[in-house]
Image (spheres, rainbow, N blue to C red):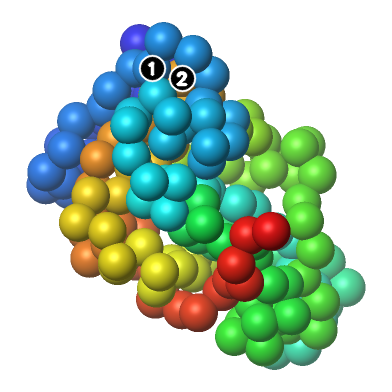
Amino acid sequence: MHPNTRRVADLLAARGAGGTVRELPDSARTAAAAAAQLGCDVGAIANSLVFAARGGDFSPSDGLRPVLVLTSGAHRVDTTKVAVLLGAAEVVRATPEFVREHTGQPIGGVAPLGHPAPIPTLVDEWLDRHEVVWAAAGHPHTVFPTSFAELCRLTGGTPADVGRDAP
């Protein structure tokens, strides 16, 4: 098991999560790829997307702070909504280097937990429409099943309306 995945699996067990990590035969770097392999609706995939926020009450200095948005695969994140929710002046998509620096994990495999330091997290309320939600487990080939409520508990995330329908 990849070290990132082992760290996520250990945290899931330590925090009393109901599901276990599952390895997929192919990479699941997108919600559509994950849903196809799992045989579920794309909306049941919890994309872990890292954004960089600056300004306002969220980050009063000129520096960028990471924000993790766990969004339904049926959505695109509305960065204006996210900025308002956080009290930030601006929220932009993070670079791969910024993502790895703050999560220790690669894009396409970012888990909602297991990062070097806590990251403020918003959890898309649309995920609550699905009994089972699938999230990445630290590597593009690994996922774990959970629920909306458990995902909020595991991450300390705030439920929020963060998206707009995917095209």
Query: CA separation, marks 1 and 2?
Result: 5 Å
Q: Position of residue 83 (x, y in %)?
A: 70, 80
Disc sitting over residue 24 in the figure = 1
User: Is residue 57 shown left or right of residue 45?
Assistant: right
Q: Say if residue 24 shows up in the picture.
A: yes
- SS assignment at label 1: loop
Residue 107 lies in what quarter of the image? top right
Point 66% across, 82% down: residue: 81
User: Considering only vertical position in the picture, is 146 above or below 131?
Assistant: above
Q: Residues within 10 Å of mark 2 (few under 14, many from 20)?
A: many
User: Is residue 19 shown left or right of residue 97?
Assistant: left
Point 17% across, 38% down: residue: 19
The residue singled out by tag 2 in the image is 141
User: Is residue 60 shown left or right of residue 32?
Assistant: right
Disc sitting over residue 68 in the figure = none
Q: Residues within 10 Å of mark 1 (few under 14, many from 20)?
A: some
Point 52% across, 29% down: residue: 33
